[in-house]
Image: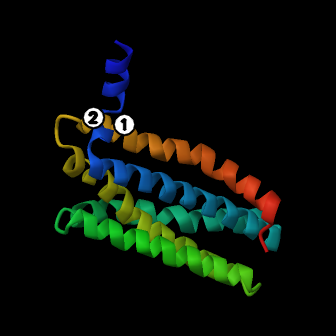
Amino acid sequence: MQTGVLSNTFSALKSRNFRYFWFGQCISVMGTWIQRTAQTWLVYQMTKSAFLVGLLSACQFVPILAFTLVAGTLIDRFPKRAILLFTQWGFLILGAAMTIIVYFKIVQYWQILAIAIGMGILQSFDTPTRQSFVVELVGEKDLLNGISLNSSIFNLAKIAGPSLAGILMVKFGLS
């Protein structure tokens, strides 16, 4: 009986492609929340301004509000795998840019805002694509389970990402 319950709880993970996707998204979404937390702390450290921290948050999330509806209609016209590869490469490039400017101590506030806007724009395409890609990976039979597991990644990352960011910032610092 227990095996059946456990098997039904994670039935979408029986799909090899969904497993790869799910584990990859665990890493990606966690990294996104780590970066957002570190960016916020860095801006506060640099400026000591609550207003500028709020402006950073606006730069991260306003593009999501502005573009997600448009993105949702566009993603149905293109292969979802290609869109996800594009957004993930974009996140990687922005993360690398952030790493480089912080490491070489050439970081400026406007650069952090530009990276935040870029992340917000990418996120506005990534999230609806990721959500609609689940059906292609698991099929109708395991769709509800796939959606649940996919949503659990985001919720877990919102808790674990900032926590891990705090540990990493204490251990390694920001600059």
Q: Which residue is mark 2?
A: 144
Q: Nearer the viewer, residue 96 or 51?
A: 96
What SS does tag 1 mark? helix
Give the side of residue 124 with respect to residue 110, left or right.
left
What SS does tag 2 mark? helix
Using the image, determine if residue 12 lies above or below residue 83. above
Q: For the residue marked with disc 2, what is the amino acid?
A: Leu
Q: Nearer the viewer, residue 26 or 45?
A: 26
The tally of labels here is 2
Residue 99 at x, y percent in the picture: 65, 77
CA–CA distance in space, label 1 to label 2: 6 Å
Quarter in which the N terminus is drawn: top left
Near mark 1 (Cα within 10 A), the count class, few <14, some 14-19 or many ≥20, is some
Image quadrant in which you'd find residue 141? top left
Q: Nearer the viewer, residue 93 or 71?
A: 93
Residue at point 16% right, 38% down?
Answer: 140
Give the side of residue 40 with respect to residue 84, left or right.
right
Colour mapping: rainbow
Image quadrant in which you'd find residue 146? top left
Q: Is residue 17 visible?
A: yes
Using the image, determine if residue 174 lies above or below residue 72. below
Residue at point 81% right, 68% down?
Answer: 45
Residue at point 22% right, 44% down?
Answer: 138
Q: Which residue is mark 1?
A: 148
Give the side of residue 1 with respect to residue 110, left or right.
left
Residue at point 16% right, 67% down?
Answer: 77
Quarter in which the C terminus is drawn: bottom right
Near mark 2 (Cα within 10 A), the count class, few <14, some 14-19 or many ≥20, is some
Q: Are dots 1 and 2 in contact, CB under 8 Å?
A: yes
Q: For the residue marked with disc 1, what is the amino acid?
A: Ser
